[in-house]
Amino acid sequence: MAVALRLRLAAADAFVLIVPEYNRSVPGPLKTLIDSFRSEWEAKPVGFVGYGLSLTGGVRAVEHLRQIFAEFHAVGMKDAVLFPRVLEHYDAQGRFPTESEGAEAAAKLMLDQLLWWALALRDAKSVRPYGV
């Protein structure tokens, strides 16, 4: 399974991580997964979607991920999609989110940045391979 994941990560031009805030950071299994790879993250953009039960909405987990991915020479997107008090985003029928306009606008902003960086870095690496 790790070999298949390694191949998929290596082939990707960009990533979007959806992360819950856990103890003011990222869940341990996610950190272990991220740390299990290195070159697969290098010189690639990463977007973030965070959620949590508190008012911060996963922002602390996202900020920790920015630091983690910077160590891998990945480019973290400035804007993220955040869901504070995530349980309040469900309606009585269990649909999520109850009001999608804000989430859609945030997602578009982050995904537009992610696409720009993915294309720019892919083009740059085709001319000059990335190496540290």
Image: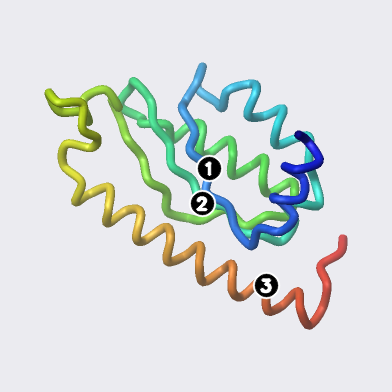
Q: Secondary structure at mark 1?
A: strand
Left or right, 81 with respect to 72, comes to: left
N-terminal label among 2 and 3: 2
Picture residue at 43% right of the left edge, 36% below the top: 50
Picture residue at 76% right of the left edge, 74% below the top: 125
Q: Secondary structure at mark 2?
A: strand
Colouring: rainbow
Residue ranking furthest to the top: 23
- In the image, 3 versus 91, the foreground residue is 3
State which quadrant residue 67 falls in.
Answer: top right
Q: Amino acid at mark 3?
A: Arg
Residue at image mark 1: 17
N-terminal label among 2 and 1: 1
Instruction: Give the spatial CA distance, label 2 vs label 3.
Output: 16 Å
Instruction: Give the spatial CA distance, label 3 vs label 1.
Output: 19 Å
Q: Secondary structure at mark 3?
A: helix
Marks 3 and 1 in Cβ contact (< 8 Å): no
Residue at image mark 3: 122
Picture coordinates of residue 45, whole percent (x, y) = 60, 58
Marks 2 and 3 in Cβ contact (< 8 Å): no
User: Label 1: how many residues lie within 10 Å, few (<14), some (14-19) or many (20+)?
Assistant: few
Tag count: 3
Q: Amino acid at mark 1?
A: Leu
Left or right, 68 with respect to 125, comes to: left
* 50 relative to 13, above or below: above
N-terminal label among 3 and 1: 1
Picture residue at 71% right of the left edge, 61% below the top: 43
User: Label 2: how many residues lie within 10 Å, few (<14), some (14-19) or many (20+)?
Assistant: many
Picture coordinates of residue 25, whole percent (x, y) = 54, 25
Marks 2 and 1 in Cβ contact (< 8 Å): yes
Residue at image mark 2: 47
Instruction: Give the spatial CA distance, label 2 vs label 1.
Output: 6 Å
